[in-house]
Image (cartoon, rainbow, N blue to C red):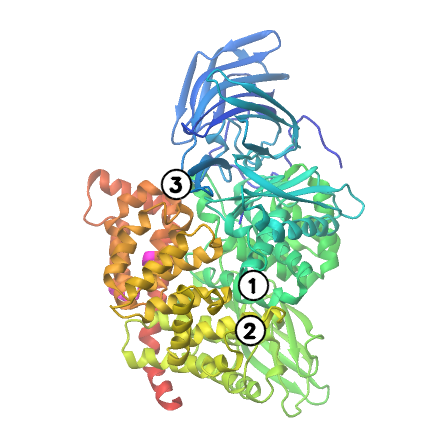
Amino acid sequence: MCMCNVQSTEQTVVGSSSSSEGREILPAALKPINYDLWLQPDLTSFTFDGTVAISVSVHQDTNKVVLNSKELTIHKATVTQGDLKQTATSIEFNKAKETVTFEFESVIAAGSNALVYVEFTGVHNDQLHGFYRSSYNDAEGNKRHLVVTQFEACDARQAFPSFDEPALKATFDCTLVVDADLAALSNMNEVSSTAFVNTAGRSVKEVKFARTPIMSTYLLAFVVGDFECVETVAKPAGANPITVRVFALRGSASQGEFALGVGARTLEYFSEYFNEAYPLPKCDMVAIPDFGAGAMENWGLVTYRNVALLCNEATATTKAKKGIAYVIAHELAHQWFGNLVTMSWWNDLWLNEGFATFVGWLATDHLFPEWDIWTGYITGVYANALNLDSFRSSHPIQVDVKSANDIGQIFDAISYSKGSSVIRMLNDFLGGQIFMDGVRTYLQEFKYKNTVTADLWRHLSASSGLDISTLMHGWTRETGYPLLTIENQEYNADEKTLSVTLSQSRFLAAGDLKPEEDQVTWWVPITVVSHLTGKSGATKHVLAEKNGTITFPYDASENAFWKLNFGASGLYRVKYQEAHVAQIGSLLQTNLSAFSAGDRIMFINDAYMLSTAGLGPITSALDMIKALALAGESEYNVLNQIKTTLDALSSSLYRENAATREGVKQLARLVFGDKVAAVGYDFPETEEYFTRLTRSLVIEAAASAGVESVQGDLRERFDRFVDGDVSALHPEIRGIAYINALATSDASTVESVFTALLAIQSNPKTQDSEKNEILRALGSANSPALIDRLINVILFDKEIVRMQDFMMVLLGLVNGKNESAVIRPLMWQWFQNNYEKLRSLYHNKSALGGPFRACAMTLIGDDSSAEVESWARGDGLEGEELETRKKDTVEGYYRAVDQTLESIRTRTALANREKENIAAWVASNF
């Protein structure tokens, strides 16, 4: 999600070295072999009927069958062993553990197989998990529905009683009974379709699917609706061809052509990379209007949000295409890494998601080398990992998971971004071929089985000759990452070498590192680039102790330089000595190309975060940005990092005086102000990828920084666009123009702009990516009345804001081009006032951490952190209300609470510590 030939019927679980003590798991008496599952969804009543016959192997004598079940009504349960068929004498549900227990009069004897049969009904909910319903309007404006599954992590149990744990793999024979005019899809290919008229007089069909390979319940999937598709065939070398189809609602399938090509080429790439054929005959990818995650890797039936799969290739933005390509690559990577080989338990979720993130970008880079994926990776995935893992309240990549309630909180930047960054670091250190060799043998040993992290390390150890498990322990089992501090450097003129003495310590964004928090010694692979090595000959070293010295070729020639962590390949930050920082700044102004774009990005990123931690002045980051501006920095990814940094600083200063805030904008205008005139507002069809991205970025940054000419140009183009001149606003800058129009309108025009945007958003011809841009833009409306309408009416109107897009609107408000000193406290108050309504929207209480974080994390001030902490504790509440609050914030989303409080306090400390320095710097530089 964005989560040798086998065919033995016996369950095989390998790599069980992770302790299962304390986990809420099913009893070990029975293990599933095969499910024969029959489901009949009803798209009118939103209920479904079902039967399941589960073949099980019996490992212990028992008279009870315990299955996972949630929100199902059980009508009948039997067990058959040999000639003895028994009906359950009692059926008991445990709502907290999400189980149902069937008790039988006679013992089910160990040593042979049995058949558990259950009849049940369920509900197609609207909560985006289980076997849920999704609504849409057809071409005639009629409201229609489809039903679709989302089972990861633990929601197969909402569709049928099951052994709903990743290690309890089985095969599945599935049958769906659906209306005759609807498409019915599952993991495998259809083997028969029989039409008949049911007892209600409706024309229906019974669709049977081929047996699946042995797999986990969370990967089973069904889709039923009025779909059509586009189709091609992937032809991986030395393997069977694969039918690839992209399904979309009727009338939209042509928007799947770009995804279809990407999907076929990605399957071909991974078949070669993993040296293992895709094991299914087909791969379907389906666009769903309502979808909680970005996509889900169901084996052979991958489901996506519309925006993550569909686009008009001729008019889609560059970012939209890149997003689609990556999400497809990520999900298709899971077809091998996650589906073919699956983690034994959720504490190794990162094995699925971290690896799929890394190789997803690897495949995207292979398909689109002109996109320079790995430099963009630094400002995205890598930066996300560094940011979240700099919190004291972060967690290890491998984290103990005791129950289903804990799982939702670890689908975060640690599992995905840090996991991916650690794998990227290891791949870079070992070399791509050695890394790939280890992955290939790992897949061969464990295909159709379950594993733990140690199993992957063992295979990488075999391919590399290194003790990977020991080297990687600190990276996966401990929280945080190191800061490398340059303690001393000594030049040897005779040998022309430089010896640099380093120390490592845990980096905390708060900066208040305590001795007991600095006990980890990481194995740190170090790459050094210098004026002698150039960008292709970086030397490699390792720091495996708290202190150490590295030596590399060097000379004392004019403009000599050196830098650690070339291309940000290692997951750590670097603190240079002050003289070295000054030397780098001077060199950037005279020889910008001496450093790679990735290195220039990290100069800025490290300088800013060191100042956040109180380990360096904020002026170092400001000086670095100014130096790059004066040197004419034009590389998109570096400019993007500059904008990100200045936005973060501005966000932390929203309670400071206008002069200080305006000073940050002045620096932004220095970087971006003159660039718009050079690039213009038009997008030639044949222009280079980064030229297009850079134009959008500099227009956005200049408008945000208050460049009046750019704001005026965008508004003029917006007015023409709304009046019917579609060419006035290229899709690449429409979202920027929408925000600008709302933020710069006065009382006489803002409502008409707001209304115009809602009309575009509701137009069925508007692409989903543009609809998302509008939802993000609405929070920038320069009108208290419209903001009130947005947060109290529009946000809860599911005809305008789908559940999946709820967070998009919240983030657009707190990060919008509005008066932050007014909007951010308003949104925190709104969250408190609407908490019960939000609880009813988010049945999974861990998901409540999303709106909580959105409405609280951008606050600044000791008063704000005290207020948020008091609310989370339930101060002023009593009895049941207090217990509910504690259950939510202590069990449901405690990580979000801890990280939010830490973020508020860290950024408040930065603002208090640096506001006078910023004011002085601005006064002396502008």
Spatial separation of the CA atoms under disc 1 and disc 2: 13 Å
Near mark 1 (Cα within 10 A), the count class, few <14, some 14-19 or many ≥20, is some
Residue ID for mark 1: 318
Question: Per the image, is 862 magenta?
Answer: yes
**Where is 497 relative to 851, above or below?**
below
- Amino acid at circle 3: Asn
- Amino acid at circle 2: Tyr
Q: Where does residue 772 sit, x and y in percent of width and height?
A: 44, 56
Residue 700 in view, yes or no: yes
Q: Where does residue 882 sit, x and y in percent of width and height?
A: 24, 43
Spatial separation of the CA atoms under disc 2 and disc 3: 39 Å
Question: Per the image, is 321 magenta?
Answer: no
- Amino acid at circle 1: Thr
Near mark 3 (Cα within 10 A), the count class, few <14, some 14-19 or many ≥20, is some
Furthest residue in direction bottom, as rendered: 558
In this rendering, the label closer to the viewer, 3 or 1: 1
Relative to the observer, which residue lies in front, 359 or 409?
359
The residues colored magenta run 855-863
**Where is 84 relative to 698, above or below?**
above
Residue ID for mark 3: 844
Residue located at (24% from left, 68% from top): 747
Relative to the observer, which residue lies in front, 284 or 668?
284
Furthest residue in direction front, as rendered: 724
Furthest residue in direction right, as rendered: 238
Q: Secondary structure at mark 3?
A: loop
In this rendering, the label closer to the viewer, 2 or 3: 2
Residue ID for mark 2: 636
Q: Secondary structure at mark 1?
A: helix
Asked if disc 1 and disc 2 are in contact, CB closer than 8 Å, the reply is no
